Image: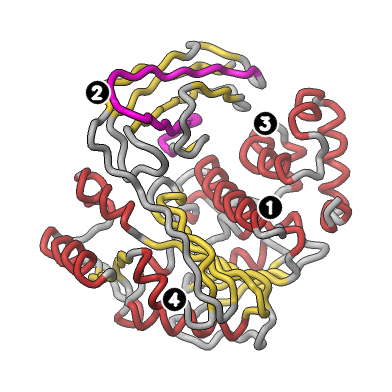
């Protein structure tokens, strides 16, 4: 048993144990209430199904502040996105032989109003947690409502008010996606200063995957909020230099540095590895859009990049078989059928009562999927298919359906 499984906050432990005892389906599904899987479930579903669970997980910010630093505008979307990022980083930590349970000091750099920070309530008894952001109102709310963290306003440039070699993990979601190259370098140097030897840094970037989406789809180009001329600059400099940055239009620039940036895996390898070992670049892993980058404080340089495949013989069409109705906790069986393509891979998504689609698989060879719904609302399922092995930048075809869960 990991160390913080013995140290859940006492009130949380009592409620989880009571709730778990009442739900034999959960016991069979997750094993025990101290598991990482149940913690993710409690934050994405349990808090919306049972007031006892909601009362012991971290609180949600007021609705008018929900989108602070992100595009999430409802509690459900806020909870889903925060839990998915926390869960993704946990899986990568697991692959390195560690976990959030084993980290003693953590920094959320650019924490917004706590969509990921709130997940660390689980570790309050055994972990020191820091968060910082430029939004003073968000920091004030976090200080008042999340009693387990130390939250700071700032910073537009280094240094951080933290001691040398004091942190186990630093993570940022959609911060370096806005910064010029010089500012990225300055912050990487600062992160290296405050990380312990062997400490882990997670960053997200707009990479080759996001650029391909922008080139394929107008809605993605519109989402980055730049003029057509500036998008042309982004694409040209991305292809020529591996890094590009332009300012946002009609938005204040923080320290003359706030805009949108794109960068390649090769640029990251060349420019981010002074004092870091590059552990991996996971294309499109953040909301199917941004790349997740993991580095370890070290003087070793290594990368095994994941390259999206381009389809030469695309899938011609796809259909999706699924029940029209289901019950909470019932295993739903989904099946995709395609025409055309070679070595076809599939990726499934779900939107649970809203427009926030989250991936429920990565690209896989299997066209069949078992999915368990936990909320009594309509679930929209979408499957993408693309020809060729491994990762894909964009799908060849897509199909969807709606399932009413009661």
Q: Which mark is residue 316?
A: 2
Q: Position of residue 404 (x, y in %)?
A: 51, 16
Q: Position of residue 54 (x, y in %)?
A: 70, 42
Q: Residue 36, can we see it?
A: yes
Q: Earlier in the sequence, mark 3 or mark 4?
A: 3
Horizontally, is 50 left or right of 357 in the view?
Answer: right
Q: Which of marks 3 and 2 is nearer the N terminus?
A: 3
Residue appearing at x 42%, y 53% in the figure:
306
Which image quadrant is residue 385 in?
top left
Badge 2 marks a residue whose secondary structure is strand
Q: Give yes or no for contact between labels 1 and 3 (Cβ–Cβ under 8 Å).
A: no
Q: Earlier in the sequence, mark 1 or mark 4?
A: 1
What's the magenta bit mostly, secondary-structure-wise? strand
Tell me if residue 97 comes above or below residue 371 in the rendering: below
Is 341 covered by the magenta stretch?
A: yes
Q: Which of marks 1 and 3 is nearer the N terminus?
A: 3
Binning the other alpha carbons within 10 Å of mark 4 as few (below 14), some (14 to 19) or many (20 upward) gives: some
Q: Earlier in the sequence, mark 1 or mark 2?
A: 1
Residue on which disc 1 sits: 58
Residue on which disc 3 sits: 49
Binning the other alpha carbons within 10 Å of mark 1 as few (below 14), some (14 to 19) or many (20 upward) gives: many
């Amino acid at each position: 048993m990991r160390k913080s499984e013995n140290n859940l906050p006492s009130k949380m432990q009592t409620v989880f144990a009571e709730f778990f005892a009442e739900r034999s389906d959960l016991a069979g599904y997750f094993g025990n209430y101290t598991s990482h899987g149940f913690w993710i479930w409690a934050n994405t579903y349990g808090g919306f199904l049972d007031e006892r669970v909601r009362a012991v997980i971290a609180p949600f910010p007021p609705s008018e502040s929900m989108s602070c630093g992100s595009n999430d505008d409802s509690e459900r979307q806020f909870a889903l996105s925060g839990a998915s990022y926390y869960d993704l980083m946990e899986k990568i930590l697991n692959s390195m032989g560690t976990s959030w349970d084993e980290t003693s000091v953590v920094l959320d750099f650019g924490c917004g109003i706590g969509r990921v920070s709130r997940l660390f309530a689980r570790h309050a008894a055994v972990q020191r947690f820091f968060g910082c952001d430029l939004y003073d109102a968000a920091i004030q709310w976090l200080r008042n409502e999340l009693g387990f963290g130390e939250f700071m306003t700032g910073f537009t440039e280094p240094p951080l008010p933290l001691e040398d070699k004091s942190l186990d993990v630093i993570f940022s979601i959609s911060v370096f996606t806005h910064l010029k190259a010089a500012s990225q370098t300055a912050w990487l140097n600062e992160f290296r200063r405050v990380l312990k030897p062997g400490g882990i840094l997670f960053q997200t970037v707009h990479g080759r995957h996001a650029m391909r989406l922008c080139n394929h789809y107008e809605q993605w180009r519109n989402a980055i909020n730049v003029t057509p001329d500036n998008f042309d600059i982004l694409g040209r400099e991305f292809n020529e230099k591996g890094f590009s940055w332009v300012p946002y239009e009609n938005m204040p620039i923080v320290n003359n540095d706030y805009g949108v940036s794109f960068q390649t895996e090769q640029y990251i390898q060349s420019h981010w590895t002074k004092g870091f070992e590059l552990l991996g670049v996971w294309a499109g892993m953040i909301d199917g859009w941004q790349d997740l980058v993991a580095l370890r404080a070290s003087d070793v340089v290594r990368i095994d990049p994941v390259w999206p495949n381009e389809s030469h013989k695309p899938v011609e069409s796809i259909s999706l078989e699924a029940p029209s109705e289901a019950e909470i906790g019932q295993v739903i069986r989904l099946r995709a059928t395609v025409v055309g393509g070679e070595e076809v891979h599939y990726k499934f998504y779900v939107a649970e009562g809203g427009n926030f689609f989250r991936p429920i698989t990565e690209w896989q060879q299997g066209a069949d999927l078992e999915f368990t719904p936990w909320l009594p609302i309509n679930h929209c399922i979408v499957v993408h298919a693309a020809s060729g092995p491994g990762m894909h930048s964009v799908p060849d075809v897509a199909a969807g359906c709606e399932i009413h869960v009661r």
